Image (cartoon, grey):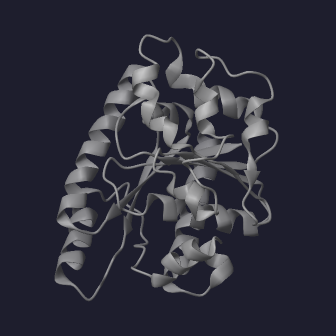
Amino acid sequence: MRIWAVANQKGGVGKTTSVVTLGGLLAERGHRVLVVDLDPHGSLTSWFGYDPDSISNSSFNLFQHQGKVPADLPAQLVTSTGCANLSLLPANTALATLERRMVGVEGMGLIVSRALAQLWDDYDYVLLDNTPSLGVLMVNALAAARHLVIPVQTEFLAIKGLERMLHTLQMVMRSQKNVLPHTVVPTLFDRRTQASVKSLNQLRKDYPNTLSRFAVPVDTKFRDASQAGVVPSALDSTTHGVRAYRHLLDELLAESHSGAEAQ
């Protein structure tokens, strides 16, 4: 199993779109894929037609057992997306109460890692969709992941948000005495605007070693796919946005293989 977290401390940068599109493309290649919603807003859950306000089986259930994960519970929480080879562990909006509920409970930063350990033989890839704030959910995702994907909208304020995300990554990794490789992915790129072009050039200048070579463009087909409740490549596999994610996936897989060989 390979576990990728998709995270940024700024909202609206394309985290959920990245999870759904990459997950769909992996599934199309025959991989068994699980996408996990760790965001109280439940955008990933809503994408596939479930209501995060009312769904009963969700990632929230994992955190209700005093730092332990009962046997077989994770498998019971997984549901269908309607896409072959792609499963969903949805979110409930009650995730927003975790910080208050879990004060003083030991081991809360490793719940997702323990849950995925129970599913290790069931999936080839797991993609974690995250809340845009530092807390127990993001700490769980960073602890479980073996690679971090950071979508960054090509605009000035989003780049400032990237700096905060990288600072958080360094802080968490220092506390865990671990190194988590990461890839910065430019998103919502519009080559027609000077601001977007300048932002992309700035990212290339500041992050030459970790920036993806492929910028994901603005693409209305992503919105259409979310309204239809399907992965974007199933709606239209030829759009500029899907093609960019396909190139990104090849890049991530190459990095993943090279990392595995180096271990």
Answer with left or right where residue 158 lies relative to residue 90.
Answer: left
Q: Is residue 201 visible?
A: yes
Where does the C terminus fall, quadrant-wise?
Answer: top right
Where does the N terminus fall, quadrant-wise?
Answer: top right
Q: Is residue 120 visible?
A: no
Residue, x 63% and y 18% (percent of image)? Answer: 65
Indicate whether 90 appears above or below 82: above
Quadrant of the rendered image containing residue 157? bottom left
Whole-percent x and y of residue 170? 33, 33
Whole-percent x and y of residue 127? 60, 50
Whole-percent x and y of residue 163? 24, 47
Indicate whether 242 appears above or below 36: below
Looking at the picture, tell me which residue is in the foreground, 6 or 213: 6
Number of marks:
0
Looking at the picture, tell me which residue is in the foreground, 6 or 51: 51
Quadrant of the rendered image containing residue 58? top right
What residue occupies the far front of the structure in this picture?
54
Answer with left or right where residue 255 lies relative to residue 201.
Answer: right
Residue, x 45% and y 50% (percent of image)? Answer: 41
Quadrant of the rendered image containing residue 104? top left
Residue, x 58% and y 34% (percent of image)? Answer: 60
Residue, x 46% and y 28% (percent of image)? Answer: 98
